[in-house]
Image (cartoon, grey):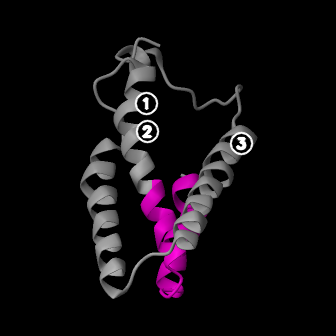
Amino acid sequence: MVINTCLAYPFYVAPVLFPKSRWLGLTPVLVGWAQVVLHGIVIPRKAGAKYGPGVATALLLHLPIGIGYIRAVSHDGSISRADWAKGLGGAVGSAVFGVIVPIRVMRDPNSPYTFTAKQLGRYDV
């Protein structure tokens, strides 16, 4: 919840507030496309499942919205290599500081809110 709300919102709001900075729009586009791979391939393989939670959102929202954003921005002019580089840096930064670091900092092996065996049973964990 913390990652998907508090930490992710700035990456989605920034391009709205600063629409001339194309790299700010590329950051969430690249994060969304990475979610297609992560939720569609990586997570299901690791879990031994056929479906990864979030893959529908990634395929049906992140992918087409990202394509639409790039088409719209390209229509107004080209996206520079610097924009792509900054967007990629922003995407990597958001993954590191918006996902990986918070998960590692906030995880609690003694949490009373663990998944039950029944909840994990279908994933053979």
Q: Going 52% across and 65% down the picture, which residue do you hit? A: 27
Q: Quadrant of residue 68?
A: bottom left
Residue 76's disc is none
What secondary structure is the magenta-colored segment mainly?
helix
Tell me which segment is drawn in magenta.
Answer: 2-31
Q: Which of 69 and 1 is in front in this view?
A: 69
| Dot 3: element | helix
Asked if residue 9 lies in the magenta stretch, the reply is yes
Q: Name the residue under label 1.
A: 43
Above or below, 45 relative to 73: above
Nearer to us in this view, 73 or 117: 73
Q: Which of marks 2 and 3 is nearer the N terminus?
A: 2
Judged by depth in the image, the label closer to the viewer, 3 or 1, is 1
Residue type at mark 1: give it: Ile
Q: Decide: marks 2, 1 in contact (CB < 8 A)? A: yes
Q: Residue furthest top?
A: 124
Can residue 92 be found in the magenta stretch?
no
Amino acid bearing label 2:
Leu
Q: Is residue 22 above or below residue 94?
A: below
The spot of residue 61 in percent (x, y) is 29, 59
Q: Are marks 3 and 1 in contact (CB under 8 Å)?
A: no
Q: Which amino acid does label 3 sit on?
A: Met
